[in-house]
Image (cartoon, rainbow, N blue to C red):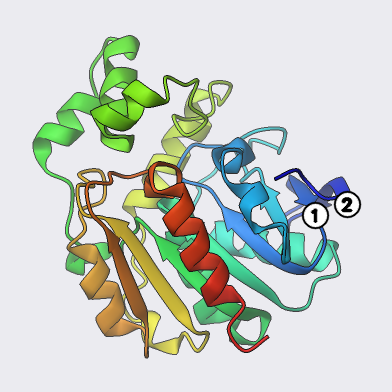
């Protein structure tokens, strides 16, 4: 499948004046794709074209990443959600489907809870509600990611994202391992924003039909967070991918893409 004709690269301004880079591809109903912590829009490179038969896809470089501004902060997931709304307003989009994974899923929770009239469908992938109710990764994962040797830390992250069998068949390069050009203050800001997320009380305010996805071998964001989200979001549906780790959307691309597309096209 190839990308459709429409291509737009734009810069919009957040409420505080921060420049936000965004990218629109394809034609059809808009689907906003929100990337994980400390990643730019290339997080979605491996799968975004799967949605172009029915949707245009909109990605963005969150503040601190890509070609967006990189202010000192502090950063938060609700601030990132405000930035998403600035992008939609800047592109003249009144209503969109929203698909967020990892920290992008946390941002998507705020978008849907605070702006229900702007979200038609919501997909949350490999994410959590945050706060004291969330199931956190274990200490061995934290230690592996905090290694002083950057190559060892990157190898650990790669192992958390993809199963060994999938990596053997798909040797990379991978676009989900972080934006290499982020300055340290922005990288730390993203970490603190993700760690500080707590949307527990807001989740019942979500009115959009919601699909929650997770790999059952995800140690970065444990899959026990899926039923927690589903219990808080009215009428949410769920699906678990056996054997998949954090980047289920790539490892289970065919199944995940078909599930998301079918969900988005219900009632159309």
On-image quarter of the N terminus = top right
Report helix, strand or loop for mark 2: loop
- Image height of 251 relative to 83, above or below: above
Residue at image location 27% in from the left, 29% down from the top: 165
Q: Residues within 10 Å of mark 1 (few under 14, many from 20)?
A: many
Are discs 2 and 1 less than 8 Å apart at CB? yes
Question: Percent position (x, y) of residue 115?
Answer: 61, 80
Residue at image location 63% in from the left, 41% down from the top: 41
Location of residue 153 (image quadrant): top left
Question: Sequence order check: which comes first, mark 2 or mark 1?
Answer: 2
- Image height of 161 relative to 101, above or below: above
Report helix, strand or loop for mark 1: loop
Q: Is residue 179 left or right of residue 125?
A: right
Camera-side residue of 176 and 140: 176
- Image height of 55 relative to 35, above or below: below
Disc number at residue 6? 2
């Amino acid at each position: 499948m190839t990308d459709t004709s429409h291509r737009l690269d734009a810069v919009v301004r957040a409420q505080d004046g921060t420049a936000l880079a965004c990218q629109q591809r394809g034609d059809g109903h808009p689907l906003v794709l929100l990337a994980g912590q400390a990643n730019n829009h290339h997080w979605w490179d491996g799968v975004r074209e799967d949605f172009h038969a029915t949707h245009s896809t909109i990605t963005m470089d969150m503040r601190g990443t890509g070609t967006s501004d990189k202010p000192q902060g502090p950063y938060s997931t609700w601030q990132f959600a405000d930035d998403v709304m600035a992008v939609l307003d800047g592109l003249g989009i009144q209503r969109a489907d929203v698909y967020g994974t990892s920290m992008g899923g946390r941002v998507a929770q705020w978008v849907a809870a605070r702006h229900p009239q702007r979200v038609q469908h919501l997909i949350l992938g490999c994410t959590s509600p945050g706060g004291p109710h969330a199931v956190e990764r274990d200490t061995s994962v934290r230690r592996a990611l905090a290694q002083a040797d950057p190559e060892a830390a990157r190898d650990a992250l790669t192992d958390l994202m993809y199963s060994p069998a999938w990596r053997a068949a798909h040797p990379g390069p991978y676009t989900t391992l972080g934006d290499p050009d982020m300055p340290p203050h922005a990288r730390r800001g993203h970490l603190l924003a993700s760690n500080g997320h707590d949307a527990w009380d807001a989740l019942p305010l979500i009115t959009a039909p919601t699909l929650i996805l997770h790999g059952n071998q995800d140690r970065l964001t444990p899959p026990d967070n899926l039923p927690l989200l589903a219990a808080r979001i009215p009428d949410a549906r769920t699906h678990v991918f056996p054997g998949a780790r954090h980047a289920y959307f790539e490892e289970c691309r065919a199944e995940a893409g078909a599930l998301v597309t079918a969900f988005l096209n219900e009632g159309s």
